[in-house]
Image: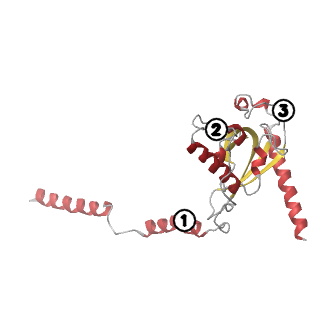
């Protein structure tokens, strides 16, 4: 009799434990509820935060006429990769479309910075400052400065590689020249005559061969920002 009664008490106690530990239980103690509310509050505040006004949609320049006639021009002159099928009509058409797209996407004539023979052209080794936004709906300007180590000419897909050091670690950023996300490319210092080609990849293994100390690049950026701030202040008066 006592044994049966003991088993009944044990079953009742086990049932209470299972109810208390069940994950689908709707019973919450005040302590658990308060911790949940305290944890969820910052998430609502972050969602309501708005950094800057959205940017308007990007539209390239309107077409000014028919596609350009590129008869007799080599890929090197057009700054596009060599294509062994270039003699075919379809390839010639794609070249014309590429050149026309570059002229429409180049809103601030930045292509002249990387065109061989241009009086304003930069060479590998120059110090560049690039500003870009990652989203037009919630624009947040990002700035990166460093040594230009490569210019990769691929027509409308042309890009540059800029290298710097952050906390002692080499960091490289690839920037599409004609991307609407790249809002500005500024030359902080022009350096010429270091290489004959379009790249300085050896800086990855020999950082001491950089034309300018990486620590000085940060100082140049600070001075440039201060100069721009003073200029804006003078113009607002």
The answer to which image quadrant residue 192 occupies is top right
What secondary structure is found at the residue carrying circle 3? loop
In the rendered image, the quadrant that contains the N terminus is bottom left
Q: Are dots 2 and 1 in contact, CB under 8 Å?
A: no
Of residues 214 and 84, the one nearer the viewer is 84
Label 3 packing within 10 angstroms: few (<14), some (14-19), many (20+) = few
Please tell me which residue is depicted at 78% across the width and 40% down the height of the picture: 116
Mark 2 or 1 closer to N-term?
Answer: 1
Q: Are dots 3 and 2 in contact, CB under 8 Å?
A: no
The answer to which image quadrant residue 171 occupies is top right
> Is 207 left or right of 174, judged from the image as shown?
right
Give the residue number, with chain letter if any, for mark 1: 43
The x, y position of residue 158, in whole percent, is: 67, 44
Q: Is residue 48 visible?
A: yes
> Is 39 left or right of 96, judged from the image as shown?
left
The x, y position of residue 2, in whole percent, is: 12, 58
The x, y position of residue 55, in whole percent, is: 66, 66
What secondary structure is found at the residue carrying circle 2? loop
Which mark, residue 81?
2
Give the residue number, with chain letter if any, for mark 3: 193
Please tell me which residue is depicted at 51% across the width and 64% down the height of the picture: 39
Of residues 179 and 116, the one nearer the viewer is 116
The x, y position of residue 24, in whole percent, is: 32, 64
Residue occupying the far left of the picture: 1
> Is 77 left or right of 216, judged from the image as shown?
left
Please tell me which residue is depicted at 58% across the width and 43% down the height of the picture: 91
What whole-number distance in Å separates the C-alpha atoms at marks 3 and 2?
Answer: 24 Å
What whole-number distance in Å separates the C-alpha atoms at marks 3 and 1?
Answer: 53 Å
Circle nearer the viewer, 3 or 1 = 3
Of residues 145 and 103, the one nearer the viewer is 103
């Amino acid at each position: 009799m006592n044994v049966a009664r003991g088993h009944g008490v044990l079953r009742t106690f086990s049932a209470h434990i299972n109810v208390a530990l069940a994950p689908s239980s709707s019973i919450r103690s005040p302590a658990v509820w308060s911790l949940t509310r305290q944890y969820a509050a910052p998430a609502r505040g972050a969602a309501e935060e708005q950094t800057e006004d959205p940017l308007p949609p990007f539209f390239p320049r309107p077409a000014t006429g028919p596609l350009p006639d590129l008869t007799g021009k080599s890929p090197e002159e057009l700054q596009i990769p060599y294509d062994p099928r270039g003699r075919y009509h379809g390839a010639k058409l794609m070249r014309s479309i590429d050149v026309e797209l570059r002229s429409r996407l180049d809103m601030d004539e930045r292509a002249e910075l990387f065109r061989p023979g241009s009086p304003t052209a930069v060479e590998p080794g120059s110090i560049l400052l690039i500003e870009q936004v990652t989203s037009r709906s919630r624009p947040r300007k990002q700035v990166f400065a460093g040594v230009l180590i490569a210019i990769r000419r691929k027509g409308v897909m042309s890009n540059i590689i800029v290298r710097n050091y952050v906390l002692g670690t080499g960091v490289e950023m690839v920037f599409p020249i004609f991307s609407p996300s790249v809002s500005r490319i500024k030359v902080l210092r022009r350096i010429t005559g270091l290489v004959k080609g379009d790249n300085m990849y050896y800086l990855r293994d020999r950082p001491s061969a950089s034309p300018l100390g990486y620590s000085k690049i940060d100082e140049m950026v600070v001075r440039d920002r201060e100069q721009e701030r003073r200029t804006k202040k003078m113009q607002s008066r």
